[in-house]
Image: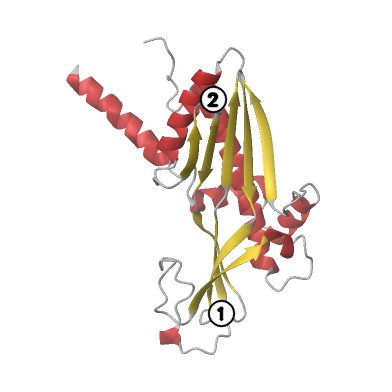
Amino acid sequence: MKKILLLAVAAIMATMQVDAQIMKAADLEQYAKERYGEKWLDAAANLAETLTLDKNESLTYQQIIQAPGKTKQQLYVSLNYWATATFQDKQAITLNDKEAGCIIISSTLHNIVKHIGTINSYSVSITPVIRIDIKEERVRVTYTVQNYDILTDISGGWFSLAEPDERTYGDSKRKADDKTNANLYDEQWEIARHYPFVPKDLQKRTCAKALVMTHAYSNAVLDKVEEAIKNGLVGNDDDDW
């Protein structure tokens, strides 16, 4: 019996680790290609026809998920369990209010795009804000991204003036507060100020893929929340035990 329990715990932990951060960047790219194709410029332009920025010029998605027969408390327990298991960074859950029925998550997905441009190379990360509002028999999920977080490498472009041994090619593993490499610097690009919302954009290839990946991640988040509502984290999170 003890051995069976240990195996069960191990299985749960493995599931939690696989689900950490919803999806790795490499898996997200494959997910995006399967749904939108590998031509990022065309995919971004097609998405722009259906997307609307909110009043804060952020990219926002919202979905209401019905949960017939489930109480607010049951839904809160399931989603709190899902959130804490999925986003293992202790700082990711910025609000967890049982009485209000609200969970807010802000967690960075690193390096969704790595692009070598003419002069510079870029590594793009995003930090979506995921808000989960819970009521009796229904849940509302809101996913918002306003900026791309960019690590720019002025030594890593195709025609960089830097010597080959001085190039770092957008070393995205560098910590955000590491200022030791003068070739690397951080900036934020507002989604509303870049392609495809601004057609003539010097960083259009980078931003095209960034938009598609950001959109794909929103779908993955909404799918995972819906799965947690309907089936729990591991598929057997019910009261019959």
Outermost residue, front side? 99
Viewer-nearest residue: 174 or 114: 174
Quadrant containing the N terminus in the rendered view:
top left
Q: How is the image coloured?
A: secondary structure
115 shown above or below 234: below
Q: Residue furthest top?
A: 240
Which three-letter amino acid code belongs to the residue tagged 2?
Ile
Residue 43 as seen in the image, left or right of residue 26: right
Q: Are marks 2 and 1 in contact (CB under 8 Å)?
A: no
> Mark 1 Cα within 10 Å, few/some/many (few <14, many 20+)?
many
- Residue sitting nearer the eye, 99 or 10: 99
Numbered badge on residue 229: 2
Provide residue 138's location: percent of width, then percent of height.
Answer: 63, 22
In the picture shown, does residue 168 fall above or below 151? below
Against 88, is 212 above or below?
below
Three-letter code for the amino acid on which mark 1 is drawn:
Gly
Task: From the image, tell me which residue sits under label 1.
Answer: 157
Residue 50 position in % (x across, y down): 79, 46
Residue 181: percent from left, percent from top: 42, 79
Residue 204 visible from this viewpoint: yes
* Foreground tag (2 vs 1): 2
In the structure shown, which secondary structural element does the residue marked by tag 1 occupy?
loop
Gap in Å between the C-alphas at discs 2 and 1? Answer: 45 Å
Q: Earlier in the sequence, mark 2 or mark 1?
A: 1
Image position, residue 189 (x, y; %): 64, 65
Q: How many marks?
A: 2
